[in-house]
Structure formats: C-alpha cells, structure tokens
Image: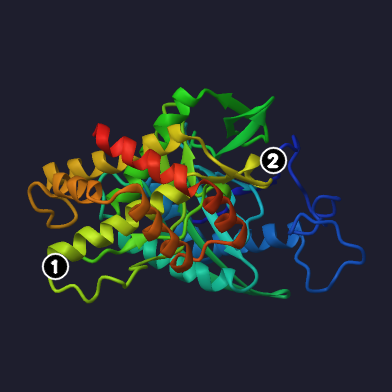
Amino acid sequence: MRFNPEIRFHLPGIPEPVVPGSRLWAMPLSGKACHGKSAAEWTVGEYLQAAKDFLIQDQGRMVCQAVERLGGGHGPIQTLSIWLEKHGAFYHPLKIIAAPPGSGRASLVLNGAVHDPGRTLIETEYRLLETLADRVVPAYIPRVFGTGSLVTEKGLICFFLGEWFDNFHEFHVTRTTERYQVAVWKEDGTHELISWQQAVKIYENAAYALTAYYALDTGYEIFPWHHAAGDFVANPQGDVRLITVRGMGLLTETVSELSDADAQRLFRLLFYFLNMTLCMRLDRLDGTGPMAWLPDIVIDAAVKGMFQSLKDREVKKAQTKISDGFPARFLEFVKSFDPEQLREIMTHLLEDRHFTAAEVQLIRKHLDSHCERIREILDQL
C-alpha cells in the first residue's frame, strides 16, 4: 500500500498553513528572536521538515500502525496535519492529525529533541512509558508507538510517537484582581477561568493518578513532575492525564536500615505522600511567571485523591500485592506524627528532592501552616 498523504504544516493561532519560504518557516525553533542567524540554530521549517521525513519513512509504517491501534480507521492515510504546539525545556511537541478515508481520524503527538539532554531524555521517557503502559487500567499516561532518530544537515534529531489526548488541556494558576484562580489553556492560546470548586476535581485526580503508579513494594514513584511544566492536562469534566514520565525510581534511601518490610513500605509511602503535597501546591503564574503557592483547597483535594487511590487498589488488588487494611494502617501511621515532626521530615525532603532555590524559599515560607493543614485534613478522614 503506497503511503502518500497530503501533508500540511501549522502553527497555533495562524489561520493559514505554514509553507516553505514564508517568514514563519524561517523563524528560530526556540521561539526567541535572534540577531544574525546562527548556523547551529534550528528553524521552524527545518524542524517541521525533519518531522515529516521521520513520519513518512518506511512507507509511514509507524504512523499507520498507531492510527490502527487507536481505532482511527483503516486504509491509506489521506492527510497528515502537523502542528507545532509549543517549545519545552527539552522537547518541541508536534500534534499530528492523521485522517484515513471516511470520517475517522487519530490524534498523535510527536515529541522531538534537537539537542542534549533532550535527546537522551527521549530514550528514557519512551522506555518508561512503554514499561508503565499496562500497569494501571485504565491508563493515565499516553500510549507510545515508536521511537527513532534522523540525521539531518543540522545534526541528529530524536523523536518518539505517542498518543495525543484530545480535549485535554494545560491548566495553571493565574491572578484575577487580588486572588488566584485556575485557568485552563486552549490550543488556540486562549484560556478559560474555572472556579476553585471545579479545579478541586483536577487536583484530586492528579494525586489519584500519581498514586496509582506508585509501587508500594519498592517505593518507586514517578518523579520529577511539575504543574508549571504542563505535565498534567485536564478535560472539562475534571479528568486528568499525565502526559510525560521523565523519571521513576526510589528517591529516598533513608529507610534501608529498617529490617521490617511493612515498616519500610509505610515510611517510603510517607515520604512520597509528603513530597506530593508540596509539589501539588507549586505552580507558576500562567505557567511561566513567578512561583505561586496554591491555596489550602488544593492540598485538601490532593490528600483525598491519594487515599482514594490507595483504597481502590486495596479493593482491586491491582498492580502490587497490597495487603488488606494497608490504607487504614498508613492513615494511622501518618497521624502518629505531629505537625512539628512532619515539618522536620519535609525539611529533609527539601534537601533530597532537588527542589530549586526559589521553590525551597517559597516552601519554607509556608511550611508551618502546610503541616498544620495536613494534620487537620488527616483528622477529618
């Protein structure tokens, strides 16, 4: 079957396709204006062309198989729309809309990296996403369909093809008058303000999803993640997906001297829990602005989401050999620490978890009230 779709390139907010020779085609890929084009600087056009070359190689086998796995239809793909979505610290994600004959279509993401450490991270992330694919059902992370590299005149570029979550969008805290509010960002660059009552569901589900992938037997967890990076996306119903897994492992070794396996599980889960409560409250205004500390209602939701996730795993006996009554034992275990003890533990976490200096400063400012709030929530459970 011959693979020869019509391919169009797009940039968000630009009504017409981007074509070779246009001003947008020659823009720096970084999105930053530069004076005197460097030979090493990738342009938007060069990156889009490399993406096209990657997708069409081997008669488009990778993208065709992805479309079939997503149930987007069968038969030759007639059009491929390639959208350059944004510029991340490591990747430049592309949204790929593949349209076979008829009314079907499939949405994919093509993550690309033109420099290290992004090229190395692509290999790591693809392997992690592939490993975690069937660990949680239904999944909260994207399926992946293939990875590879391409040698171009500009140098090596690495890609991986994955699932795009339609109708899911980034969300960030923003400032309205004198208070914070959550804004959901759309693909066209606009945003929609939602109430904290609506936002609560998002943060609750984010904590639920993270805990679903936490390995109780080993203490391995997904980390790092950050709201400011847009790692979580949400739909209008408050459902959440985690679009990236940059790392997973045991991040705290301080319980290795404990001989009792159950005690190790409790302490490791305690460290995970306390770290999650801190990270859940960190964002940047509008995603890129000053650091922001989210209000108490966010940590209320996160604690609720985590414990609900543990309870559901106990019922399903899924993913790990969770013993009967473990969530209840963990709750009592956490309650055995007073706010001052929690504060001491979290102070050590600030040293272990590679928080930035700005994050540490913000956390320390709010740490006492944060610990008090955790105890109040736990006492209500």
Inspect this view and state whether residue 100 appears.
no
Per the image, the residue denoted by label 1 is 261
- Quick check: marks 2 and 1 in contact, CB under 8 Å? no
The mark lying in front, picked from 2 and 1, is 1
Q: CA distance from mark 2 to mark 1?
A: 51 Å
Can you tell which quarter of the image residue 322 is in? bottom left
As shown in the figure, which amino acid type bears the numbered disc 1?
A: Ala
Number of the label disc, if any, that sits on residue 12: 2
In the rendered image, residue 157, in percent from the top left (x then y), is placed at 61, 70
Q: Residue at x 54, y 64 (%)?
A: 159
The mark total stands at: 2
As shown in the figure, which amino acid type bears the numbered disc 2?
A: Pro
Q: Residues within 10 Å of mark 2 (few under 14, many from 20)?
A: few
Image height of 52 relative to 380, above or below = below
Taking depth in this image into account, of 264 and 146 the one nearest to the observer is 264
Inspect this view and state whether residue 190 appears.
yes
Q: Residue at x 16, y 50 (%)?
A: 318
Q: Earlier in the sequence, mark 2 or mark 1?
A: 2
Taking depth in this image into account, of 351 and 306 the one nearest to the observer is 351
